[in-house]
Image (cartoon, grey):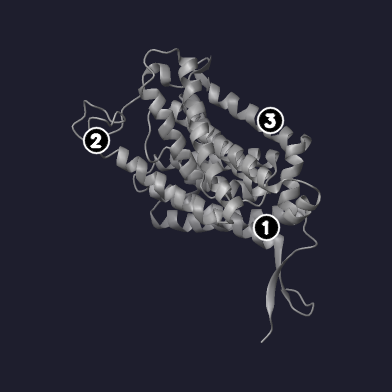
Amino acid sequence: MSDFHLVRRADFSIRRLIICYAVGILISLGIGALLLSGLGINPFEYYKRMLTMGLIGNRYAYKCIEGLLKIFVPLLITSLALGLAFKMRFWNIGGEGEFLIGSICAAIVAFNSGSMPKIVTITLMCLAASLSAGIIGLAVAALKVRFNTNETLMTLMLNYIMLYLIRYLGSTKAPWNFFLNPESERPIFGQFADNCKMGGIKIGNFTLLYSVIAAIIITVIIYVYLKYTKQGYEISVVGDSSATAKYAGMKVGKIVLRTMFISAALIGLASGLATATAGTISESITNNAGWTGIIVAWLAKLSVPAIFVTTLLISVLQYGCQAAATQYPAIDSNFADLLQGIILFSVLAADFVATFKIARKGGQEK
């Protein structure tokens, strides 16, 4: 029996990648069209509304843009943060958990802020979120450096620990639990005071949230950090070969600790901004940014500009699916999630086909 194995294509090209992506997207849309037809819905009308996000003929189109940006900002920062760790070959799969602990700590500040000015409160919320998530990430990195633990398993377990922690806080009525609305008979999270909610710049009816500006600044900083600083170069060297980095005199353990702290702290910052924007917390505050960010970083090949573009496209897909689903009673949010999953899976499969090929030991290739 022939022994086959996967090898990276030596003839990889952007043209091949684009063609594979196009084919993958067309296949996924075809599958979605079949499902929509089975529900008695015209797939062309659905896709038109999905791709335009309900902007056409909508007198409140600015609300659609605001909704899109609320998805875009946390996903962008989270994807950039995960890309930092992945570039070092440190598999930080704990984006969801780091996001949740950041949100919890931001809420602690919000519910105990008193009458502090908005800029002070939101700054403290973001700092609390960043530091808490950064410390968690640093702890995982320290275990990896000291005991060579499996960071994939450690960060994955972290997601579930934080998920059940926020569920506990949202379901336990006790005198100490200031997270809950005291006026509600059933346990629900309370709303923040106005001085804890994200502000923005008014442009007509449209509000450009300060979190959007912060996300763009962070993108530029990370691009410069990776491309033009010594620390960014060290991350690339460690990712290529930790043995080479050690031979060159680099302190690999220190680089791993520093980079993982920055990665987790950035995810915490994303959660602080998202929590201030939402004005409350919930177990769905992440909007799956920790999981989707892995896909974004992978598809973008860990390139900062590509992460920005890929995040924007996936945000349009997510918001567009939600906007389209609201117009059809036969479709709920579960179908929107299903369609997103089919499209993302197809794109990942296309990326795999464009990057790898099957080879037989002995030289023959498929």
Please indicate, yes or no, whether residue 235 appears anywhere in the rendered image: yes
Q: CA distance from mark 1 to mark 3?
A: 32 Å
| Quarter of the image where one finds residue 354 | bottom right
51 relative position to 351: left or right: left
> Residue 303: x, y in percent?
70, 43
Pick whichever, 188 or 236, lies toward us. 236
The residue shown at (40%, 48%) is: 161
Amino acid type of disc 3?
Answer: Ile
The residue shown at (35%, 48%) is: 330
Do the CB atoms of the residues marked 2 and 1 lie less than 8 Å apart?
Answer: no
> Residue 148: x, y in percent?
59, 56
Amino acid type of disc 1?
Answer: Cys
Element marked by disc 3: helix
Q: CA distance from mark 3 to mark 2?
A: 41 Å
Q: Is residue 7 above or below residue 87?
A: below
10 relative position to 164: left or right: right
Residue corresponding to mark 3: 221
Residue corresponding to mark 2: 187
> Residue 66: x, y in percent?
50, 27
Residue corresponding to mark 1: 20
Does label 1 or label 3 sit earlier along the sequence? 1
278 relative position to 141: left or right: left
